[in-house]
């Protein structure tokens, strides 16, 4: 037995541990590996957050445009009657906003499309914004009949129209004098504007996040709705036919006096939309140039307003789209 152990000393030799130097080298290597893994993770997380914010901004832009576009295309559509001056408005059909009767303004169907330049003016729009309308942002008003025929609905302002005339009513009964070939549509009145607030459930974020909103006619009352949060500015130009050729000759700001003497053929919309999440390791330097040449470039954190209007920690996307009227 002793001879066996003598010939195989490894069976009874004492075990050797790691030296302090080997342990320190192993710890250093491990720390480098962990640091590399953490760095890769943080970069991946940052890249994901950036891509997610950009994709959400693009989605918000598409949603906003998809909401406004069909509304603009339906301007001057009055069911079977294509002449707003032949639509009767009998007594008893009224529109209210904040308890005030704004029927004369809301039911002015000859103004099927209207744009107010750069300011939410209560003299031009007798219906107050949700909180405070954004400065230097345009307001779009559209009036038309619904794209589809609708069932009779008492309380809702509706339009009965045939080839010769139309009439507004809100009692759910087809007005006298209209035969079986006439059609029933809901009356649509929308006011699109940018507000300094949103519907965010967090009160701090609610009043720090701007949004595209609209006041829309529901059962004779202008209801305020959020279209999409994150819209910081909206500018509009009108494509005009100034010579009766049936095509757009020029695009102008809505305050241009030539608008009153021309036919509106198209609407060009510019929006500045920001992400809904601020990135504290990102600084947006812009600048962004609105359609309105009278306005300065928008520099996040700087001109044309205080940093609270355009904070620099948000990613942004500016987009322009031209929409042609169908009617």
Image (cartoon, rainbow, N blue to C red):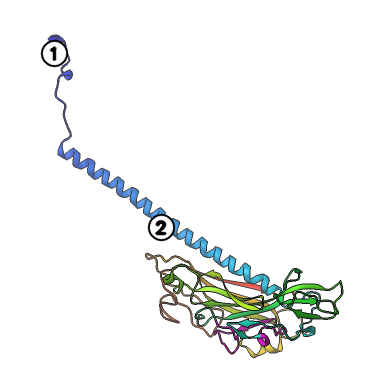
Q: Residue at x 14, y 21 (%)?
A: 13
Q: Which residue is drawn at 17% across and 32% down?
A: 17
Residue count near mark 1 (Cα–Cα under 10 Å), binned few <14, some 14–19, many ≥20: few
User: From where the camera sits, is residue 42 visible?
Assistant: yes
Residue 239's image quarter?
bottom right
What kind of secondary structure does the magenta stretch mostly adopt? loop
Give the Cα distance between marks 1 and 2. 64 Å
Numbered mark located on residue 227 in the image? none
Q: In the displayed structure, does residue 28 sit left or right of residue 307?
A: left
At numbered mark 1, what does the secondary structure look like: helix, strand or loop? helix
Q: What stretch is highlighted in magenta?
A: 103-128
Residue receiving disc 2: 46
Q: Does the magenta stretch include residue 120?
A: yes
Above or below residue 105? Residue 188 is: above
Provide residue 84's location: percent of width, then percent of height.
Answer: 76, 82
Provide residue 90's location: percent of width, then percent of height.
Answer: 76, 85
Numbered mark located on residue 6 in the image? 1
Above or below residue 208? Residue 31 is: above
């Amino acid at each position: 037995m002793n001879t066996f152990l003598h010939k195989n000393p490894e069976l009874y030799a004492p075990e050797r541990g790691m030296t302090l130097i080997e342990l320190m080298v192993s710890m250093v290597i491990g720390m480098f590996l962990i640091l590399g893994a953490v760095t890769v993770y943080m970069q991946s997380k940052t890249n994901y957050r950036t891509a997610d914010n950009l994709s959400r901004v693009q989605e918000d832009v598409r949603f906003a445009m998809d909401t406004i576009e069909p509304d603009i295309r339906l301007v001057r559509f009055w069911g079977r009657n294509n002449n707003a001056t032949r639509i009767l408005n009998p007594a008893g059909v009224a529109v209210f906003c904040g308890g005030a009767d704004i029927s004369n303004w809301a039911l002015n169907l000859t103004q099927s499309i209207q744009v107010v330049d750069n300011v939410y003016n209560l003299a031009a729009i007798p219906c107050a914004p949700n909180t405070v309308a954004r400065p230097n942002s345009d307001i779009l008003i559209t009036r038309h009949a619904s794209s589809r025929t609708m069932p009779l609905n008492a309380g809702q302002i509706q339009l009965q129209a045939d080839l010769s005339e139309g009439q507004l009513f809100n009692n759910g009964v087809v007005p006298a004098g209209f035969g079986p070939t006439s059609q029933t549509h809901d009356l649509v009145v929308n006011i699109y504007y940018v507000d300094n607030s949103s519907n965010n459930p967090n009160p701090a974020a609610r009043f720090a996040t701007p949004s595209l909103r609209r006041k829309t006619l529901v059962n004779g009352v202008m209801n305020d709705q959020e279209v999409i949060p994150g819209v910081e500015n909206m500018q509009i130009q009108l494509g005009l036919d100034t010579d009766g050729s049936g095509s757009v000759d020029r695009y102008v700001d809505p305050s241009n006096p030539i608008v009153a003497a021309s036919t509106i053929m198209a609407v060009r919309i510019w929006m500045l939309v920001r992400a809904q999440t601020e990135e504290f390791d990102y600084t947006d330097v812009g600048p962004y140039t609105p359609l309105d040449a009278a306005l300065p470039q928008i520099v996040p954190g700087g001109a044309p307003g205080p940093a609270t209007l355009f904070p620099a920690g948000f990613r942004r996307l500016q987009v322009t789209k031209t929409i042609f009227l169908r009617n």
